[in-house]
């Protein structure tokens, strides 16, 4: 089939109105949301968020290994900076939201294997309203998948103003555009380094947040419906 006969239409993401990331909101709002997360899910400190089914292609075990190196920079070869030391002392969490898929046993054992069992929390079912709070209050969202059919959580995170790190493979660059920080999903050191960058650079987080708001506007159901209707009308006229 020739390329001229192929038209790509993208899924949309639900429009989020009057909601922004917690960093843009008042202190009272931030406290109320964090109280909910603390009381209901035990989220009691700054955290990075992953959303997806527990299965090998999501690359969660490598993510946990990279996270352990962020928490313990003394394990990374090379000199340590004061900023790395400060990051370690900040006591951060990795929150993993998603149901069990297949071959998930090694994923569940990974936090203990890499010495971060007290800093990684698995949440299975999370209601939509609570998931929105998790997106809004996260320092950033990360999806280091080995491959994705589309990568909807990347757009969900952007819609809530949550900075994004994702893989430079499969469909993810098409979804993320220039609004995300990319990693080689096969490189633990690259994932670790990009996580350190975004943890320590508030300006970078703000830049990704701003770009994310613009990128997510390209993916909406109204645009998808109109594009599909145009295609069908053109076919009907032939």
Image (tube, rainbow, N blue to C red):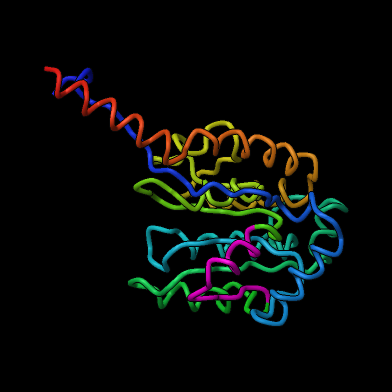
Is 6 on the left-hand or right-hand side of 179?
left
128 inside magenta stretch: yes
Residue 166 rendering spot, x and y as whole percentages: 53, 46
Q: Can residue 190 be seen in this view?
A: no
For image coordinates 47% across by 47% down, the residue present is: 13
Residue 133 falls in image quadrant: bottom right
For image coordinates 74% across by 66% down, the residue present is: 92
For image coordinates 40% across by 74% down, the residue present is: 100
Residue 163 rendering spot, x and y as whole percentages: 65, 47
Residue 11 rendering spot, x and y as whole percentages: 38, 43
Residue 71 falls in image quadrant: bottom right
Residue 19 rendering spot, x and y as whole percentages: 68, 52
Is 185 on the left-hand or right-hand side of 87?
left
- In what quadrant of the picture does the C terminus appear? top left
179 inside magenta stretch: no
Residue 84 falls in image quadrant: bottom right
Relative to residue 19, is residue 34 depicted above or below?
Answer: below
Closer to the camera in the image, 15 or 215:
15
Relative to residue 56, is residue 187 depicted above or below?
Answer: above
Tell me where the magenta segment starts and ends, as one range.
119-135
Q: Is residue 114 visible?
A: yes
Count numbered badges in the picture.
Answer: 0
Is 1 on the left-hand or right-hand side of 47?
left
For image coordinates 43% across by 74% down, the residue present is: 106
Closer to the camera in the image, 109 or 164:
164
Is 214 on the left-hand or right-hand side of 74?
left
Relative to residue 225, is residue 134 depicted above or below?
Answer: below
- In what quadrant of the picture does the N terminus appear? top left
């Amino acid at each position: 089939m020739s390329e001229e006969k192929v038209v790509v239409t993208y899924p949309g993401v639900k429009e989020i109105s009057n909601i922004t990331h917690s960093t843009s909101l008042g202190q009272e709002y931030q406290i109320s949301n964090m109280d909910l997360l603390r009381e209901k899910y035990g989220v009691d400190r700054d955290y990075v968020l992953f959303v997806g089914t527990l299965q090998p292609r999501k690359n969660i075990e490598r993510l946990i290994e990279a996270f352990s190196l962020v928490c313990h920079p003394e394990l990374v070869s090379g000199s340590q900076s004061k900023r790395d030391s400060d990051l370690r002392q900040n006591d951060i969490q990795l929150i993993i939201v998603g149901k069990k898929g297949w071959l998930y046993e090694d994923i569940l054992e990974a936090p203990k294997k890499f010495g971060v069992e007290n800093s990684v929390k698995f949440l299975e079912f999370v209601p939509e309203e609570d998931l929105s709070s998790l997106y809004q209050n996260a320092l950033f969202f990360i999806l280091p998948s080995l491959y994705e059919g589309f990568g909807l959580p990347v757009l969900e995170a952007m819609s809530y103003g949550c900075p994004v790190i994702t893989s430079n493979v499969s469909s993810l660059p098409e979804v993320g555009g220039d609004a995300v920080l990319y990693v080689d999903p096969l490189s633990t050191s690259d994932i670790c380094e990009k996580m350190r960058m975004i943890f320590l650079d508030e300006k970078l987080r703000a830049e990704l947040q701003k770009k994310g708001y613009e990128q997510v506007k390209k993916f909406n159901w109204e645009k998808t419906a109109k594009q599909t209707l145009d295609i069908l009308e053109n076919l009907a006229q032939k």
